[in-house]
């Protein structure tokens, strides 16, 4: 028998005397969400910038919505952290058995505050808080609102099904279990780099803020079997009063047992901490982190989060769901931020803290940095700092590399030529400045942005005709990362093969350059740079005229890429006239005429091509290569990408199509809320037609939805 069983006629359990029995209070009514299990709430949490580290950083996803599980906090490859309840020998191990289902009162980037009743008259406030990259807290304030006493046994546990959890010892002085676990470098979308310092062996401490009554470990097939470990069934139910107190061995579960006796109207608090570190680090650091987590005052951190959100626009939303998406979007981008490290003196972001992918961890890319546009409303200084990563690492010739971050600029040279990325630099900087009003930042950005455009003029316009082509490693520069109906025209639908994007004058890059020039002109005006105003005005007009002269097809009344050799819509006998979302970028860049915009709107609103249920697809639905099946990352032949749909929306507003822009926003909201209601995650891309998809989850640029909502409500003021 795995656990020691003691049958008793009556058991008096220890009454917990905690340091504080006060619940945390969310003093700002705007930030109170009261989200039910099927509401559109994002539920991943990560430590604040100041308490985060790059390696051995643990973020957790909260599952409070799956009925046949307990409230569970999961970290990729690090297992589940949860608490199982037993009240008067009744085991409550599934949410469906709760008397009152969990409600998320408030949700912040590093914290969730829940309320529920696992058993009649047992009222609970649960605070889940990611204190540091190493320590996560489950803090329970429990009140007996009834007229009889209750004996409660709490079982905090860590469950790692990969069978790598190795018990080291029980540490009496620190009230917890010490164990290790292993994490592979393999990832679904992109593996971690084995030679870059990522740990694979971890040390853990599962502890309590006061001494638990027992502890135990087990090797079970799934978490459901833990029920039988804490309650054996027979003709007469026996009361399991202690765990097996195993002190070593390979297991799946490490658990503590904390006993509480609550008299009528009595309230108490208890705190459990799961701490993790790289096994190569001194164990003393783990112990220190856990000790600190045991004694911190949670209200202080609630108040800090309230202060963080003080600057965001206080929109009077029509629905509670809109506010949940709004707060969730800010939570997503904030929790992706990390403190300066390595070769950068500025804070930077990763694409996701949980899950972690190799290509999404450690370096910024300009198109992901569009997330700084909404982030500026939450923390403009931090958004500016992120953009300064590019400025401090910019090359002397003006090049901004494909990626920048703690390992310095990453240019991925191809055929001896360094790679850059899609230029959204000055646009992002202008949007941040529009919130921060920091002219020192604006001047830095203006100088760096000017140098960058001059680099592109020299290095991405081979024939010097004023239109641009992607570099030889165009498949990453052009943001596609996978097969594209035009740029890999001769690759027969595979991700590998000939990429012709550097042999075309491309619509997307040329429009993006025009947009950058437009914002450099805006910066020049703000900085009273007369010569700059003249230079950027002339260059914008020239670029706009070239786009409209060569890339606008008068027959189809749509924009396309053209062959660099002759500016035609053919390349080696194959047509380049494929209707992609980039055909609407000239509206976003303000280069289309009113008449051209009117024609583009007809294409946009055609339900057989672009006007799909969940947004504007990257390729028209009537193209033979269109696919709405999003079965992985980087799909550009039909997937909905929120940032690009936002550009379509912005383009419509540029030309006065505000109602149509609002309808695009509604489609984006439908895509996002549908997923958040089902699985409580943001996604890299969305299916235009179906609610089922398999793209990377918790992706940073879902945060653009905060900006979408700000704009859609701003027009009604």
Image (cartoon, helix red, strand yellow):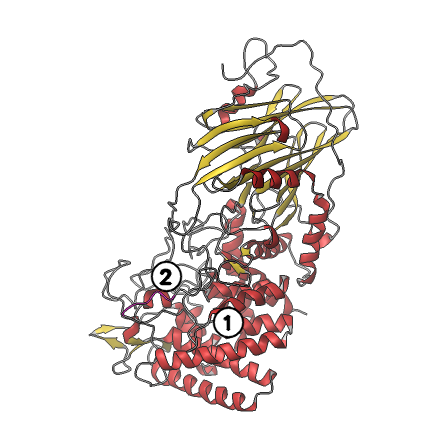
Position of 364 with respect to 553 (left or right) is right
Where is residue 393 drawn, in percent x and y?
47, 69
Q: Quadrant of the C terminus?
A: bottom right
Q: Assign a secondary structure to mark 2.
A: loop
The one of 433 and 55 positioned closer to us in this rendering: 55
Residue 329 shows in the view: yes
Magenta span includes 413: yes
Residue lying at 61% horizontally and 36% vertically, measured from the top left: 273
Give me the C-alpha separation between circle 1 and circle 2.
30 Å
Residue annotated with mark 1: 391
Asked if residue 80 shows in the view, the reply is no
Q: Residue at x 42, y 88 (%)?
A: 542
The magenta-colored residue range is 411-415
What residue sits 60% from the left and 63% below the top? 382
1 or 2: mark nearer the eye: 1
Task: Give how far across and how far down residue 425 sits, in percent.
Answer: 49, 72
Q: Residue 490: say if magenta.
A: no
Precedes in sequence: disc 1 or disc 2:
1
Q: Is residue 303 above or below residue 440?
A: above
Which residue lies under the disc numbered 2?
A: 636
């Amino acid at each position: 028998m795995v656990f020691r069983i003691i049958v008793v006629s009556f058991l008096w359990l220890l009454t917990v005397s905690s340091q504080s029995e006060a619940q945390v209070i969310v003093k700002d009514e705007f930030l109170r969400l009261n989200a039910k299990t099927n509401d559109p709430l994002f539920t991943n949490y990560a430590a604040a910038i100041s308490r985060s580290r790059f390696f051995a950083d643990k973020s957790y996803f909260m599952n409070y919505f799956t009925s046949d599980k307990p409230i569970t906090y999961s970290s990729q490859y690090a297992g589940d952290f949860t608490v199982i309840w037993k009240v008067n020998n009744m085991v409550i191990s599934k949410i469906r058995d709760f008397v009152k289902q969990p409600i998320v009162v408030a949700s912040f980037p590093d914290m969730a505050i829940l309320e529920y009743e696992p058993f009649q008259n047992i009222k609970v406030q649960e605070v889940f808080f990611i204190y540091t990259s190493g320590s996560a807290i489950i803090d329970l304030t429990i009140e007996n609102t009834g007229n009889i006493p209750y004996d409660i046994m709490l079982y905090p546990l860590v469950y790692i099904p990969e069978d790598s959890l190795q018990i080291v010892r029980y540490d009496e002085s620190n009230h917890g279990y010490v164990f290790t676990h292993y994490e592979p470098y393999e990832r679904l979308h992109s593996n971690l780099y084995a030679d870059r310092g990522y740990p694979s062996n971890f040390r853990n401490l599962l502890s309590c803020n006061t001494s638990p009554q027992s502890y135990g470990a087990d090797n079970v097939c799934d978490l459901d079997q833990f029920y039988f470990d804490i309650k054996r069934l027979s003709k007469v139910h026996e009361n399991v009063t202690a765990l097996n107190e195993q002190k070593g061995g390979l297991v799946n579960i490490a658990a503590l047992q904390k006993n509480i006796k609550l008299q009528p109207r009595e309230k108490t608090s208890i705190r459990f901490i799961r701490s993790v570190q790289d096994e190569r680090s001194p164990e003393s650091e783990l112990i220190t982190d856990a000790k600190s987590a045991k004694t911190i005052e949670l209200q202080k951190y609630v108040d800090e989060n309230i202060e963080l959100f003080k600057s965001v626009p206080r929109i009077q939303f029509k629905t509670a769901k809109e506010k949940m998406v709004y707060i969730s979007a800010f939570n997503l981008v904030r929790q992706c931020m990390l403190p300066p490290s390595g070769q950068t003196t500025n804070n930077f972001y990763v694409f996701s803290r949980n899950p972690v992918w190799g290509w999404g961890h450690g370096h910024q890319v300009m198109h992901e940095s569009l997330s700084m546009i909404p982030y500026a409303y939450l923390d403009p200084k931090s958004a500016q700092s992120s953009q300064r990563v590019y400025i401090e690492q910019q090359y002397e010739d003006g090049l901004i590399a494909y990626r920048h971050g703690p390992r310095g600029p990453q240019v991925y040279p191809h055929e001896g030529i360094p790679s850059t990325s899609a230029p959204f630099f000055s646009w992002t900087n202008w949007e941040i400045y529009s919130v921060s009003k920091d002219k020192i930042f604006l001047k830095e950005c203006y100088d760096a942005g000017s140098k960058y455009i001059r680099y592109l003029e020299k290095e991405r316009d081979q024939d010097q005709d004023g239109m641009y082509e992607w570099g030889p490693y165009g498949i990453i520069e052009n943001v596609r990362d996978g097969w594209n109906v035009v740029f890999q025209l001769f690759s027969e639908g595979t991700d590998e093969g000939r990429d012709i994007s550097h042999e075309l004058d491309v619509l997307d890059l040329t429009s993006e350059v025009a947009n950058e020039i437009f914002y450099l002109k805006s910066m020049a005006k703000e900085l009273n740079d007369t010569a700059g105003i003249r230079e950027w005005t002339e260059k914008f007009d020239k670029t706009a005229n070239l786009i409209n002269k060569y890339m606008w097809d008068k027959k189809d009344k749509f924009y396309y890429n053209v062959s660099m050799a002759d500016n035609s819509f053919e390349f080696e006998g194959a047509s380049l006239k494929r209707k992609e979302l980039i055909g609407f970028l000239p509206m976003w860049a303000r280069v289309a005429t009113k008449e051209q915009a009117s024609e583009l709107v007809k294409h946009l609103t055609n339900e057989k091509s672009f006007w799909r249920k969940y947004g504007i697809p990257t390729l028209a639905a009537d193209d033979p290569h269109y696919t709405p099946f999003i079965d992985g990352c980087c799909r550009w032949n039909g997937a909905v990408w929120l940032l690009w749909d936002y550009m379509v929306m912005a383009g419509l507003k540029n030309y006065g199509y505000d109602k149509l822009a609002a309808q695009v926003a509604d489609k984006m909201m439908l895509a996002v809320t549908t997923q958040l209601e089902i699985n409580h995650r943001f996604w890299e891309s969305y299916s235009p037609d179906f609610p089922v998809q398999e793209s990377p989850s918790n992706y940073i640029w879902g945060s653009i939805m905060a900006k979408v909502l700000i704009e859609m409500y701003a027009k009604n003021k």
